[in-house]
Image (spheres, rainbow, N blue to C red):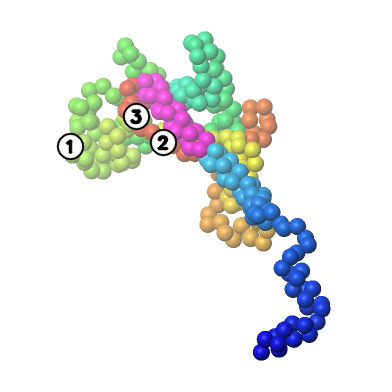
Amino acid sequence: MENKEKGGAMNEPAFRRRLRTRTRRSPYPARPAGLGRRGIALVDMLIAAPLVLWMGLAILQWGLVFHGRNTVSYALLESARQGSVAHAEAAAIDRGLARGLVPYLYGASSGGEFAANLARAAAHVAAGRRAGWIELNVISPDSRSFSDWGAPARDDDGEPVPGQIEIPIDSLRYRAVSAEPATGVAGYRGSEPIGAASGQTLADALLLKVELVYGVPLTVPLVGRLSAWIMRQLDGCEAAAARRIGLVHLASQAQQSRAWACRYYDAVDEAGRPRPRWPVRVATIVRMQSPPRMAQ
């Protein structure tokens, strides 16, 4: 049996013996351990790095948007406070908004610097109103409130103010239950009558409700402009045929038109340069500290 095996080995073709020997002892240098894994890691990094960078920029941009929303809420509160002591006049509400925006836009380290930046903020508010990316509205009291509860205005000395209508604020506890709305009583809330035109009691009509839509600038490179472009397509700011990304027709994906938002995505700054913005909507309510007067 052993002779057969030896004979078989002797009779094995020479090329097979050489192949087996070369397999055992390769003349080529061995590949360093881990070289293949390092190559795969490099490819993974090249694929993942842009995605990680994009996600970081996106988080930074939306963090700035949320920060802007919080600071704009504070500015609107300052605006309402200013209006509450100035008869809810539009000019006073605008001045309060500019005052509240100074910390967000410019900051100040001294009284002189604050005065200078307050003027800059007032110009910023005026420019935003003209361009449409600042919209400040007084929700209440409105014309129906004055129809129910309005009376001839009087100055601080009790003298009539010609051509002015205001909602009296003095002796409110007594007036709230004794005054009758001019358009008729639609019901009662406790002992307070509700005006038929406004659906408000006198106490309700003396709440100043203000709403602000402000365009927070999208300043992070790449992410900001791309976000504005995507929302411009989704909100119908482009022609219906042009609203698509690749093979996806965005016109068919939109649930409802938000044409009002287009002016924010296409906003320009004070120098006339394109600067896309993201609209944030905030509202606040304060108690009037002076009688509100109807706007002329």
What residue sits right under mark 1 in the picture? 191
Question: Please, what secondary structure does the residue beneath circle 2 have?
Answer: strand
Residue sitting at 53 percent across and 41 percent down? 59
Q: Position of residue 149 (x, y in %)?
A: 31, 31
Residue 276 is a magenta residue: no
Which of marks 3 and 1 precedes in the sequence? 1
Q: Amino acid at mark 3?
A: Val
What residue sits right under mark 3 in the picture? 286
Q: Amino acid at mark 2?
A: Ala
Q: Quadrant of residue 193?
A: top left
The residue range painted magenta reads 63-91
Residue sitting at 44 percent across and 33 percent down? 70
- Number of other residues with Cα within 10 Å of mark 2, as a class: few under 14, some 14 to 19, many 20 or more: some
- Number of other residues with Cα within 10 Å of mark 3, as a class: few under 14, some 14 to 19, many 20 or more: some
Question: Please, what secondary structure does the residue beneath circle 3 have?
Answer: strand
Q: Quadrant of residue 272?
A: top right
Position of residue 234 in the picture relative to residue 142 (left or right): right
**Whole-number angstrom distance, CA of label 2 to CA of label 3:** 10 Å
Residue 64 is a magenta residue: yes
Disc number for residue 283: 2
* Outermost residue to the top: 112
Q: Quadrant of residue 219?
A: top right
Q: Amino acid at mark 1?
A: Ser
* In this view, 220 is above or below 13: above
Q: Position of residue 162 (x, y in %)?
A: 40, 19
Q: Are marks 2 and 1 in contact (CB under 8 Å)?
A: no
Give the camera-side residue of 128 and 183: 128
- Number of other residues with Cα within 10 Å of mark 1, as a class: few under 14, some 14 to 19, many 20 or more: few
